[in-house]
């Protein structure tokens, strides 16, 4: 059996209620070598309820590998666009665009 690893999960919008957590952020345990898609059944979430995924603040997919200590954020379709737009206003994103246009 694979060793377990602990990750932090952040759920946007109604996903926290659908997962039965009621909290936006919590810790979860998965076997080492797990991917984002392995997390969904543990949370009772179907893939069609996930529109945007981030691992450690970077865009990710269901196939993205998860490591010990990672932060995995999942957003439903109804929040994904607003989240995507707001990420464009992060300091790092604004500075990157300034450098590219200079």
Image: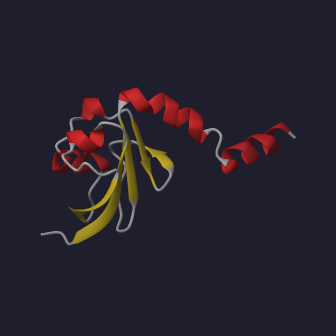
Residue 101 in picture, x, y percent from top left:
83, 37
Viewport quadrant of the N terminus? bottom left
Left or right, 20 with respect to 102, comes to left
Q: Position of residue 53 (x, y in %)?
A: 40, 42
Residue at x-position 36% and y-position 64%: 67
**In the orientation shown, which residue stands out farthest toward the left?**
1
Indicate left or right for 74 with 21 as reference: right
Give the quadrant of the C terminus: top right
The colour mode here is secondary structure
In this rendering, would 26 be left or right of 59?
Answer: left
Percent x, y of residue 57: 50, 52
35 w.r.t. 7: above or below: above
Residue 95 position (above or below residue 49): below
Q: Residue furthest front?
A: 22
At x 50%, y 36%, the residue is 83
Q: Nearer the viewer, residue 54 or 85?
A: 85
Q: Residue at x 36, y 43 (%)?
A: 74
Instruction: Give 77 or 96, whichever is nearer the viewer.
Output: 77
- Quarter occupied by residue 85: top right
Residue 50 position, x and y percent, is 32, 35
């Amino acid at each position: 059996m694979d060793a377990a690893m602990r990750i932090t999960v952040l759920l946007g919008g109604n996903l926290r209620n659908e997962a039965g957590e009621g909290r936006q952020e919590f810790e979860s345990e998965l076997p080492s070598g797990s991917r984002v898609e392995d997390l969904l059944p543990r949370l009772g979430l179907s893939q069609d309820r996930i529109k945007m995924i981030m691992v450690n603040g970077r865009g990710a997919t269901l196939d993205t590998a998860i490591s010990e200590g990672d932060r995995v954020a999942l957003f439903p379709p109804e929040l994904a666009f607003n989240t995507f737009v707001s990420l464009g206003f992060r300091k790092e994103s604004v500075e990157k665009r300034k450098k590219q246009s200079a």
